[in-house]
Image: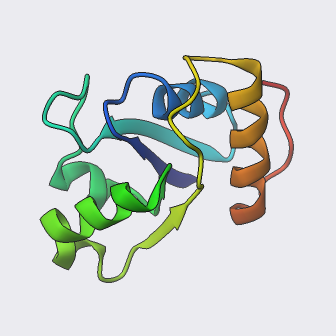
Amino acid sequence: MIRVLFVCSRNQWRSPTAETMYRNHPALEVRSAGTSPNARRTVNAGDLRWADIVMVMEYTHKNRLKAQFGRLLEYKKVVVLDIPDDYHYMDPELIGLIEDSVSRHLEIPDQDV
């Protein structure tokens, strides 16, 4: 099992969409969190220790994580999916972008979402 942490700003639309999409994937364990103190669920050190790979939506999320949790990220793979905050939860276009981006970074069998 690969443990994937999806991160966006407020854990409202993008990262929860990714978590929902991959929640039942047989090769993955997934969580989502946000970098903002106002996030529905704010990323913490335990999340980063748990994750095998961290997938952030934007470079600003990667920079925030490095600033706050630098030592925990030294040996973690952090991937920027480069998905802007232009979509709502489970928006079909957002789902397509997440599928394309994630598949480029993880070698996992396809699964219907």
Total marks drawn? Answer: 0
- Could you tell me if residue 40 is visible in this image? yes
Quadrant occupied by the C terminus: top right
Q: Is residue 103 above or below residue 78?
A: above
* Residue 52, position as x, y percentages in the image: 45, 63
Quadrant of the image occupied by residue 43: top left
Colouring: rainbow
Please name the residue shown 40% across and 36% down the image: 32
Q: Is residue 110 above or below residue 18?
A: below
* Residue 58, position as x, y percentages in the image: 47, 54
Quadrant of the image occupied by residue 108: bottom right
Extreme residue toward the bottom, this view: 74
Q: Is residue 2 above or below residue 77?
A: above
Q: State left or right for residue 98 relative to residue 18.
A: right
Q: State left or right for residue 111 relative to residue 15.
A: right
* Residue 63, position as x, y percentages in the image: 30, 66
Question: In this orientation, which residue lies closer to the viewer: 47 or 91?
Answer: 91
Please name the residue shown 76% across and 27% down the image: 93
* Residue 54, position as x, y percentages in the image: 45, 58
Q: State left or right for residue 104 relative to residue 65.
A: right
Please name the residue shown 42% across and 37% down the image: 31
